[in-house]
Image: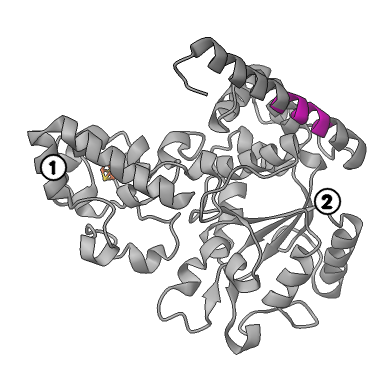
Amino acid sequence: MAKGNNSEYKKMIDKQYKDLMKHCQLHMEEIEKNLPEPKEDLHELLKERGFSRRDFVKWTSAMTAALMLPPIFRPMVAKAAESFSRLPVVWLHFAECTGCSEAFLRSSYPNVDDILLETISLEYHETLMAASGYQAEENLEKAVKDFSGKFICVIEGGLPRGLNGKYLTLGPKGKTGIQVAREVTSKAAAVVCIGSCSAFGNIQSAKPNPTDAVGISKAIGISTVNIAGCPPNSVNFTGTLLHYLMFGSLPALDGLGRPVWAYGKRIHDYCERRPHYDASEFVEEWGDKGALKGWCLYKVGCKGPYTYANCGKVRFNDGISWPIMAGHGCIGCTEPGFWDTMAPLEKPLDEKTYGGGERTVDNIGIALTGAAVAGVAAHAIASGIRHKGDK
Ligand code: SF4
C-alpha cells in the first residue's frame, strides 16, 4: 500500500500490530500451561539489588523500543521478563575463554538485563554448576531429556574440526565438542550462539588456525542465532530471549544470523563522534589535540564504518560508556574473522585489503567538506548496499 494514503496506511499498520499482539497473548498463555513454574521472583530480586518499580517500567520502555516494537507491547515485555526463569536453558562451552559468561556475571554495574540473566533457569552450565565428571554428564543428559524440544541451547565457543574434532574433548567419556554439539542441539527448541567464537570461530579460527576451528553453524551445519561480540552486550542476549518468550519465534536475522534489531546498523551510524567524521576532524595520533577534543578515531584504526552492532546505543556497564566514548576505536568484534580482516587494529583499512564498502577517509572528508549533500547521499547508498547484502 502506498504510504501517501495516510489513513489507510495507518489502519493497515494498526491491524498488523493488533494481530501481532493477539499472537503474543496466545503464545504467552501457552507458556503458562507448558513451561515450568518460575524459579525466581524477578521483582524480589530487583528490590534486593536496589531497583525500584519505576526503574523496571523504564527498562520495559527501553527494551520495547530496542526490539522495535510499539509502546503497546510494554506490558508484554514486562510479562516476558517475569517469565524469564521459566525458560529452560542448557549452556555449553567449547573453544573459548568464558569471557562472555564472565562479562554477564561480573558486571560492576549490573543493569536490569544482568539481573534478568541471574534468574535464567540454567539446567546445565559448566562454569557455574558444582557438579563435575560423570555427575555433570548425567545432569546434561537429564536436562536434554526432561526439556526435549523446549529448552534453549546457548553455546559459548567455537568447534575445532581438526583431527576429527579431537582438539576439543569434553567430559569423562572424552566426547568431542562436535559430538556434544550435535547431540544437544538436535533436541533444542533453538540454538543461540553467544559471542563471536560460537558465532564465527573468532580468535580460535584466526590464521593459521591449526585446529581448524569454526563457528557452530559451519561446524555442524545448523542454523543458529548469533549474538556476536567479544563479548556481546547482555541487552542483545536478553532481548532475543524475551522475543522468543513473547512470540515463540526468534527475531528477524541478517545474513550472518544476527538479530536485525540489534545488529541492523553500523557502529558508525550510532556514533557520537560521527559529526567529527563528517567534518573531517580526526585524531591523527594518540594524545594529539583531536584526541583531547573527542574527534573521530578513524585514522587511528576505528572499524566502526565496517561493523554492524548497537554498542553506541545500548552501551555497557548500565549504559555508562562504550569503547569509542572511552577513547578507543571500534575493533570490529561483531564481524566474522575480525582478527584477520580488521587488522591492523590501530590503523585504518585500505579499500584493497577490505574490498570496499566505504571510500578512504581522506576522500570522504574532502568530498563531504566540499559537498555535504552529495556526501550524505553516498553514505546512504553505501549503507543500503550493506543492508541489501545482509538480507
Ligand atoms: S569512524 Fe569510528 S569514531 Fe569515527 S564516527 Fe565512525 S564509528 Fe565513530
Tell me the element at label 2: loop
Is residue 280 in view? no
Main SS, magenta region, reads helix
Residue 372 versus residue 302: which sits nearer the camera?
A: 372
In the image, residue 356 lies at what x, y percent? Answer: 26, 57
Q: Residue furthest bottom?
A: 163
Mark pair 2, 1: CA separation: 52 Å
> Would residue 108 be counted in the magenta stretch?
no
Q: Residue furthest top?
A: 7
- Kindly identify the residue that appears in the image at 35 percent across and 47 percent down: 385
Q: Which region shows up in magenta?
A: 20-28
- Crowd rating for badge 2 (residues with CA inside 10 Å; few <14, some 14–19, many 20+): some
Which circle's residue, 2 or 1, is located before the other in the chain? 2
Tell me the element at label 1: helix
Residue 48 versus residue 164: which sits nearer the camera?
A: 164
The quadrant holding residue 322 is top left
Provide the residue designation for mark 2. 150
- Dot 2 amino acid type: Lys
- Which colour assignment does the render follow? one colour
In the image, residue 231 lies at what x, y percent? Answer: 51, 54
- Kindly identify the residue that appears in the image at 15 percent across and 34 percent down: 279
Instruction: Determine if the C-beta at disc 1 is less than 8 A from ligand 1.
Output: no
241 up-or-down from 46: above or below: below
201 up-or-down from 249: above or below: below
78 up-or-down from 347: above or below: above
Provide the residue designation for mark 1. 365
- Dot 1 amino acid type: Gly
The quadrant holding residue 108 is top right
Residue 36 versus residue 371: which sits nearer the camera?
A: 371
Is residue 203 in view? yes
The quadrant holding residue 274 is top left
Quarter of the rendered image showing ligand 1: top left
